[in-house]
Amino acid sequence: MSIRLLMAIPCWALLALGAHAADPGHSRIVFQGGGPRHIGLYLADADGQHEMPFLPSAGRDFNPSFSDDGQWIVFTSDRAGSADIYRVHPDGSTLERLTDSSAFDDQGALSPDGTRLAFVSTRAGGAANIWLLDLARRKYARVTRDAGGHFRPSWSPDGRWLAFSADRDMPHRRSGPDKPPPEGSGCCGWEMVQSTALYIVHPDGSNLRRLTEPDGYAGSPKWSADGKRIVFYDERGQIVAVDVDGSRRDELTSSPARKWSPQFIGTTVHYLASDNGRMMLADTSGATGPDATRIWSPAWSADGKRVVYARGEWGEIPDGRAIEPIGPVDREFDFYRATRTQSWSPDGRKILFAPPFEGTPLLQVMNADGSDRHTLYDTKDPATGIVFPVWSPDGQSIVFTLGRYGSRNPVTPAQLARVNADGSGLQLLTHGDSGSGYPSFAPDGKQLVFRMLGKEPGLRILSLDTGQITAITHEADNFPAWSPRGDRILFTSMRSGDFEMYSIKPDGSGLRQLTHDHGNDAHGAWSPDGRLIIFTATDSGWKDETRLPSNDIQSNGELVVMRADGTHRRQLTDDLWEQAVTAWLPAAH
């Protein structure tokens, strides 16, 4: 999970930011992450030439596929709020919403006769399973029922089988020397590493068979025209074909380029490739297309003449705004997205920001409306970053981590530093051989809690009056957050074998384990009254193959809310991307 921090924003500040009028009865959450700000679909010739935008919208449209007869393009969109599946003719006419659920629906594929839709959904339990929709009768049926994620369904030409990838039988491991993450993923040892295998099953859920070995990686299966072979990409990024009866396995590519999204067109297999940073559409005959940077999940028409794909755009929020509202997500909360690590002054008039992880040497500030952006403090050393800035409760000073806190083995450990609100008067608050980070102020501003790395890890409390540092934990605990009531400190720890949420009193007594999940629970934030906690949880697992270039190596982090004692837990979000809690805003008035 990404390292993110944001202080609470007063209600009036949202109006200055141009946010939509919130429901007066709703609580409001600001988070950083949540995937691209926009994803558009594009149509092109089979090799990617003569590209043109397809079905422009203000939402996010992704994971398209052609019907076998070429008359429909099926795709996922969150244009109406949650991710649902739509279809439309290739000329853009007759747009039709096929699924309508608050759950996550994705990766749709029409049956060869066009009467049924196979798709991935988290309905009825939260895990990603394969479902069928009878389009005429509007009846849903669940195909897979086991724990784990099931992805990328593909129909056999005769409609009697579905192929898919799944992590259902796979051991869930964390990245490390024995199980490194995919090349270029940036995985840091925190994340779970996904393994997948290929399966086939009848549409009624019977005769399930696994075609590839467990504890490897196999993704995005597609059938040959005769229904005898299935093509997929493996953990090395190569294209492989396997006979459905298990009698033969052939490696169809061997170049260093990584490859994804294979599809038979006759006896040739088309795919997406990345070679030395350049993405392109290619096929096993050796043909390649023009630069196809940032495209996702291409799908070719059965006649091999056209390709449809998605392209995502992250980018900054327009007009210099710090946050933007997103569509309806939950009946009790309004959600706002931030695209950078931020900390708001207590009066809501100014915003601090510095990039996450290792950061830059600059600490900058701007007004809440995005104006008057300027540098508040400059380390004047490109090797010394600034991360995790927070305002003191009285707004008179700023504390941040100075140094390479995100580095595994920094030459100089990161320390906590303080400057005045105008950037003057730099003062180091911590010293020594251990790295310090993630500061969080007590409500009275006289103390702060932070995380210490090194030989003696744990949470520490620093008295700003005396400089005295007191240890309250001695484990590799992380993400501390002081309750607005002042009575407890929330944090994440792996002391039970998984990353769980805990709380403890500031004197080190009264330790409570608040969650008991498989996966990662982290990035906790208190409600303004200290009664509730919102955090990011990954126990619902993956919703897609993590090796695809459009996705993230880590399992999907969803927002979850619970009471301060860990009871009455409820998941708030359900989509393809991580949400990291950054602020809980008071209800609008």
Image (cartoon, rainbow, N blue to C red):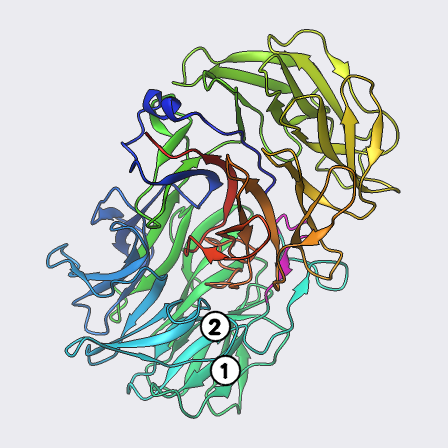
Determine the residue positioned at 40% across, 88% down: 228
Work out whether residue 289 or residue 409 is closer to the camera in this orientation and state it. 409
Determine the residue positioned at 19% across, 68% down: 70
Q: Which mark is residue 232?
A: 2
Work out whether residue 278 or residue 516 is closer to the camera in this orientation and state it. 516
Measured as percent of width and height from the top left, residue 382 is found at 69, 21
Residue located farthest toward the left when viewing the structure as drawn: 94
Q: Is residue 540 above or below residue 134?
A: above
Q: Which mark is residue 129?
A: none
Q: Residues within 10 Å of mark 2 (few under 14, many from 20)?
A: many
Is residue 45 highlighted in magenta? no
Q: Work out how far the residue at label 2 is from the one at label 1, CA to CA, in angstroms.
A: 8 Å
- Contact between marks 2 and 1 (CB within 8 A): the answer is yes
> Is residue 158 visible to the viewer in this orientation of the structure?
yes
Name the magenta segment's main secondary structure: loop
- Marks 2 and 1, the one that precedes in the sequence: 2
Could you tell whether 247 is left or right of 483 in the image? left
Type of residue at label 1?
Answer: Val
Is residue 188 highlighted in magenta? yes
Assign a secondary structure to mark 2.
strand
Please give the range of residues in magenta. 184-194
- Residue corresponding to mark 1: 242
> Is residue 379 visible to the viewer in this orientation of the structure?
no
